[in-house]
Amino acid sequence: MNEMHPIRAKSGTNQEGTSAHNRRVMIDALRLNGQLSRADLARATALTKQTVSNIIEELESDGLVASLAAVRKGRGQPSTPYRLVPEGAFAIGLQIDRHVTRTIAVDLIGAVLARGEANLPAGGPEKGVGTILDLIARTRHDLAGIAPQSRDRFVGLGIAMPGPFGIDADADDPWMMAAWQNFPLLETLSAGTGLDVRLQNDAAAAATAEKMVGAAHGLDQAICIYLGYGLGAGLILNGELYRGANGNAGEIGMILSQPRAAGMKRAPLEHRVSIASLSKILGLDPADPGLYRRIDEIAGGPDARVTAWVEDAAFELQAAIQTLESIFDPQTVILCGGMPPGLARLLMEAIHPLLPSIAEHRARSMPRLQLGFTDPWAVAIGAAAEPISRTFDPRFSAILKTGTAGAV
Amino acid sequence: MNEMHPIRAKSGTNQEGTSAHNRRVMIDALRLNGQLSRADLARATALTKQTVSNIIEELESDGLVASLAAVRKGRGQPSTPYRLVPEGAFAIGLQIDRHVTRTIAVDLIGAVLARGEANLPAGGPEKGVGTILDLIARTRHDLAGIAPQSRDRFVGLGIAMPGPFGIDADADDPWMMAAWQNFPLLETLSAGTGLDVRLQNDAAAAATAEKMVGAAHGLDQAICIYLGYGLGAGLILNGELYRGANGNAGEIGMILSQPRAAGMKRAPLEHRVSIASLSKILGLDPADPGLYRRIDEIAGGPDARVTAWVEDAAFELQAAIQTLESIFDPQTVILCGGMPPGLARLLMEAIHPLLPSIAEHRARSMPRLQLGFTDPWAVAIGAAAEPISRTFDPRFSAILKTGTAGAV
DNA sequence: TCTATTAAGTCAATTGTCTTGACTTATTTC
DNA sequence: GAAATAAGTCAAGACAATTGACTTAATAGA
């Protein structure tokens, strides 16, 4: 029917989908609980002992899990716990951040094994791609020195860069991020590295990092506010990063804040709450490689400009947090970003007390707001964690026949 | 391991999960495309013809799908299209809305077959439950008159009432909604009706209605703003209603709007954008059963109070829509609610032009904002649609062994 | 110290579901 | 009228989880 319109339908599944899901569930359970016996896994996943045994045997021969010494605990045969093998998989993360690009190599458990950094030449992607490919090659080489088995065990290359994507960007953007967005980056890097390449915005990457090895580890509903050069949020909903219809979900920096007084105009939140805005106030050059150190110095000794910025940013963040809580009803909100830890602490202090919200409910067992990574490398780590997550985390689309199944 | 802490893990799946998913996918495809042949279904779902044939045969013998006359279209054997059988399943929806309660009976395709309404007696749930059970019984009786087969084909009872849930509510709430929330409603109604009972807030129910039979039909990423006595949003993310950690996602009425001038305090959005706030301004009694008619009359003839409220509400809604677009990057935003259509039109006009946002992207093919149901019955329809959706729509949790699988 | 109990884990057969490839049927095109 | 095309069926096969009995190895209790 409907020759004209394509038929809209979700994909079906089969035994392969079942098996792939169950393998992912095992890995996820080991990631969350550290180590579990086959019997533990059977109970936790509602599968039978036999099924778990078969899957674990497979995963072991694939080099993804390994057994530990048997433990005696009470009556019955001692159990043999299993753990993830860090060297079971590797991924590369690439951050493209205006004037600088960073690479990170991580293993299956998200541990950072190698990193690299380079300045991006002026002139946009045509020139920058060479630098990037060199940097990736160098990082892979470094990684091969530490973990020779990595050569055959890459699951992908994750890229993080500032969003939003697919929007006609400001012409006056000095960093030519618009040019980067229009450049066929995925195709070029896929061809240049032979890896499976995906793109996410930097806030999403930061959230991926928090989920894999940070404050959101084990949480299924968490909102990560990422305060870097810009402002964004990574949305972890039902255990997965939410991307929206066009991959631009979480662009809270583009929210227009209400005019605060008559005559004031609505302005994007990012204009008040970002390292870019702070740099502007401090008269610093955002291209300065030592920017973070400079900000750290200035923020350390009391500085009226910093205090005013913090107050203003905190005012907006209070509202943003209250808004996000009202909309998402998350388990927690995590503030992270590429900023000096001292500045992050000032912000956290200024944000408290939080505005009242539905987050103040009876069942709360976790702080409403937590501080996540403030390391400038967190985005690159998240970029690297994305292929690991995509390949090994249980998710709906991994079950479907046409879903991007990954390789588990 | 970890005797103290329960093991955290997702559930595994098996052949049953596979089969259940594939059945749901078939039903979903027929719902979206109206009618499809087995071959169409095989192509659309990536399953084999044989598998589709087996599943369709089963669904047909279960009375959920039926064949239509064969159609010749080009070379090859004519195809036999299948469609959903409306009488294949039925559900009851119950709306509890302060002074009034409504019931709706729908079939598999979401068509309304019976409805009922009653005033809720003062005195809260202890007294109200009797009224409700009577009303449900009456609706089931009416339905049995139209569709005798409904007796054996109920998939559940969906309840919608104002949220948020689990929050210590205002003591000065004149409608005793807090008492309703503390009352063991699900248990009582489950025992009283023998049906599977679920609860959602009214905005979520409105979104469920839009998804099943309204403006969000076939959309996977849509935000429904529900403007009724209160204000809320129903979030359709990846084709499913998002509930948040505690079932309170979408409570945008609780967002504290920024002070608009020095000296003004932050106030919940709901205080400006709701029928409650309009009633207050107009000096109307919200308990008046004729409230909507009265508002319609007043809004019809130019009225300065209405104009001022519309302007104010539209100002806030502009910001709310821009915020939601920035956060979710949805395909569209739908404004719906329990208000006179004339008022809805005034609001829609006043909201335009929309504030700029990432929704203005290159690939846009749908209006950023659409008007959905303004029928006061929409929430009850959505409540009734929820069990249908839960039972027949493809979703992750339906695949899992311990997921609430429903009965497909 | 011996025995019963408990729990982990394996073995072999079974079941349920999708897949495969050949086949039948019905229609249009040339 | 023959060839091409597409829908749909048949029967055997493949795959993955399940079942129930069994083995192994520990502790608890008499």
Image (tube, coloured by chain):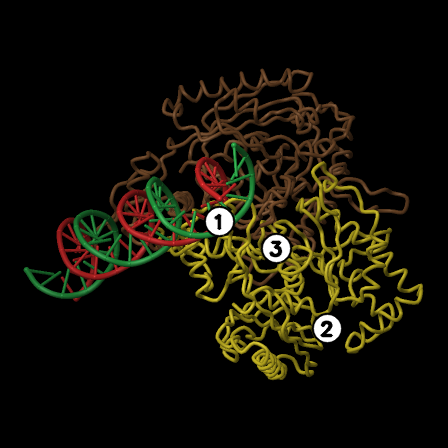
Chain colours: A yellow, B brown, C red, D green
Using the rendered view, name the quadrant where residue A277 is placed: bottom right
What amino acid type should be assigned to the residue bearing mark 3?
Answer: Asp
Q: Chain of mark 1?
A: A
Give the label, 2 or 1, closer to the camera: 1
Residue picked out by circle 3: B329
| Residue A172, label in figure | 2
Residue at (51% x, 24% y) in the render: B115
Whole-Å distance between the Cαs marked 1 and 3?
53 Å
Give the label, 1 or 3, closer to the camera: 1
| Left or right of residue A88: residue B177 | right
In this view of the protein, which residue sits in the foreground, A14 or B356? Answer: A14
What amino acid type should be assigned to the residue bearing mark 1?
Answer: Gln
Task: Residue B186 in the image: state x and y as whole percent.
Answer: 57, 27
Residue at (52% x, 78% y) in the render: A193
Contact, CB < 8 Å: mark 2 with mark 1?
no
Task: Residue B362 in the image: state x and y as whole percent.
Answer: 58, 63
Could you tell which of marks 2 and 1 lies nearer the N-terminus? 1
Residue picked out by circle 1: A77
- Rendered view: A92 above or below A327: below
Q: Chain of mark 3?
A: B
